[in-house]
């Protein structure tokens, strides 16, 4: 099973979550990142994510494999959208199942942080004032 | 030596293309980036980028091979 | 809207999660606690939760209200099952939406910890070896 | 003074009932619990319990009122 994937259209979380559950999994932690209506106070109209797909998939898979080794968890997955997204749409989902909640929360948080820091995906925002641009954070 | 260079996000906007074939005499990735930066006016110094060869991250000291597919990765903003 | 409730039958998470989302909410963190097949190494057959319903609902609501004040979040809810549960069934769900992921994760974790510590609900486990009993943790 | 006492979980098993009407001369919640513990053989000392009056947690020093509904809350295990 691939644990990380890119999705070029809206995707359904329910079957993904189901795939993480089994009788050893007493705890499930999930994270969803959605398109907000503003970024640092500036009204956002719409947003587009682009990826270097081959590298993003490889690096995403590496992060999920690392999470499986680092944390006492049962299973973990992550899906990241690419393409045009409307306000409120789901941009990224992380799900982790584990025996206990400590590991589920810690792994879920670690995965989203690593995905944001390492996976070659870029956000292009169009603001209500007509300005648009790529986000290339300093850190 | 001939390599393919891929551009993403603001580097693609600056280069005006998604990729290009480059005939280069550069002896390493830093030198290659410096040449492309001068040609396309990229804003980022190499220190702010990561670099990938054939869809795998590598160090800036990795060898430059004929036929390689190279991507200079500006700061990412997924999530 | 009540933020905390008891459920005496299986419940669907999807509409609850939906109720937390709006355009200010860039982040959603969710937690699910499920019936495991073992407790401290002992195979579990089935499980029953009982509550002092009036007090559990009041104390649960108090925890969720506290979370709304303590954390920079948009909305939060929690539902806890009572009655007989089968292996793998959902026992408790917590959902939190927020502008950013720090607050969403922190509030979600805080709520489940407080619910486990403060809400008058008791777990009765039946083990595969026929023994059964109430759990009254020391801490 | 007459109060209603509710029992949950292992306290209910020990008492053999979910609730009972108790006629008591106790002057406080601690004294009431001590009497009921002696009668039903509850395992928990008061220090391991919380106490609620009329479906609200109170301190052990809260007054005992005629007609009150009292619950001694053993350590909880939800979640």
Image (cartoon, coloured by chain):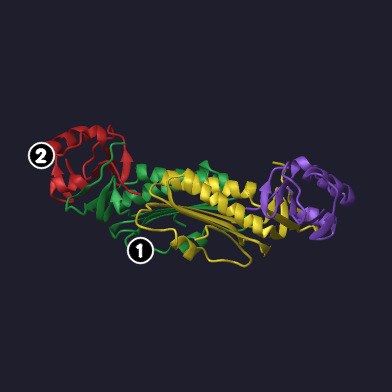
Chain colours: A yellow, B purple, C green, D red
Question: What secondary structure is marked by label 2?
Answer: helix
Calculate the distance from the C-alpha at mark 1 to the C-alpha at mark 2.
39 Å
Q: Residue furthest bottom?
A: A9
Q: Could you tell me which chain the residue with mark 1 belongs to?
A: C
Label pair 1/2, CB-CB below 8 angstroms:
no
Return the mark for residue D39.
2
The residue sitting at 28% across, 40% down in the picture is C137
Disc 2 crowd rating (10 Å Cα; few below 14, some 14-19, many 20+) is: few
Residue C10 image label: 1
- In the displayed structure image, the side of residue A53 where residue C5 appears, left or right: left
Task: Identify the image quadrant of the C terminus of chain A.
Answer: top right
Residue C92: % across, % down: 38, 54
Q: Residue at x 48, y 46 (%)?
A: A69
- Disc assigned to residue C43: none
Q: Is residue C108 visible?
A: no
Question: Chain letter of disc 2?
Answer: D
Q: Nearer the viewer, residue B51 or A112?
A: B51
Q: Count neighbours of disc 1 (C-alpha within 10 A) and say few if under 14, some if 14 to 19, many if 20 or more.
A: some
Whether residue A65 is visible: yes
Image: A46 above or below A109: below
Q: Is D25 positioned to the left or the right of A114 in the image?
A: left
Q: Nearer the viewer, residue A71 or A112?
A: A71
Please, what secondary structure does the residue beneath circle 1 have?
loop
From the viewer's perspective, is the residue at label 1 or at label 2 nearer?
A: 1
Q: Position of residue D37 (x, y in %)?
A: 15, 37
Which residue appears farthest toward the left when viewing the image? D39
Rendering coords of residue A63 (x, y %): 56, 49
């Amino acid at each position: 099973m691939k644990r990380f994937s890119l999705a070029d259209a809206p995707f359904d979380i329910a079957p993904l979550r189901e795939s993480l559950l089994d009788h050893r999994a007493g705890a499930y932690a999930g994270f969803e990142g959605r398109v907000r209506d503003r970024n640092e106070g500036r009204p956002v109209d719409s947003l587009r994510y682009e990826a270097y797909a081959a590298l993003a998939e490889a690096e995403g898979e590496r992060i999920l494999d690392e999470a499986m080794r680092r944390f006492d968890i049962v299973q973990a997955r992550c899906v990241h959208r690419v393409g045009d997204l409307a306000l409120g749409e789901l941009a990224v989902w992380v799900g982790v199942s584990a025996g206990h909640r400590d590991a589920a929360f810690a792994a879920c948080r670690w995965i989203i942080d690593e995905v944001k820091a390492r996976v070659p995906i870029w956000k292009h925002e169009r603001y209500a004032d007509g300005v648009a641009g790529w986000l290339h954070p300093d850190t | 030596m001939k390599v393919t260079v891929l551009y993403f996000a603001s580097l693609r906007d600056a280069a005006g293309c998604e990729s290009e074939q480059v005939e280069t005499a550069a002896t390493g990735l830093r030198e290659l980036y410096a040449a492309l930066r001068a040609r396309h006016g990229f804003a980022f110094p190499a220190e702010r980028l990561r670099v990938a060869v054939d869809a795998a991250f590598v160090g800036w000291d990795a060898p430059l091979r004929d036929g390689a597919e190279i991507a200079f990765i500006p700061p990412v903003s997924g999530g």
